[in-house]
Amino acid sequence: MRAWRIWGTGDFLDWWNFDARRPRKNCALVIDVGRRVRPTITSDDPGAVLRILTAGRGRR
């Protein structure tokens, strides 16, 4: 994980949400939305975010 990337992109592939506490976290969620740039988030509760994202997969 790019712990010191506080916001934005450094490789034009992953877009990091703003999180000033990212250097103290050890988990990031990369969300594949089918485009070149992937939103990447560091949640305080990654398990909850994962449950929310996977629960909505069948609702299209």
Image: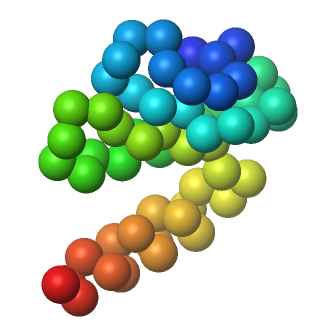
Q: Determine whether 37 is above or below 55 in the image.
A: above
**Residue 22 sits in quarter:** top right
Residue 30 spot, x, y in % from top left: 40, 41
Look at the picture and state if 43 lies above or below 4.
Answer: below
Q: In percent of the image, x 30 and y 33: which residue is there? A: 37
Residue 35, x across and y down, in percent: 19, 41
Quarter that holds the C terminus: bottom left
Between 13 and 2, the one lying in front of the other is 13
Colour option used: rainbow
- The residue shown at (82%, 31%) is 20
- Vertical comparison of 54 with 29: above or below: below
Left or right for 57, reference 17: left
Mark count: 0
What residue is drawn where x is 48% and y is 39%? Answer: 40
Q: Is residue 8 at all visible to an observer of this figure? A: yes
**Visible in this render: residue 25?**
no
Q: Residue 43, percent across and down? A: 66, 51
Q: Residue at x 47, y 75 (%)?
A: 52
Q: In terms of image quadrants, where is residue 49?
A: bottom right
In percent of width and height, residue 29 lies at 47, 44
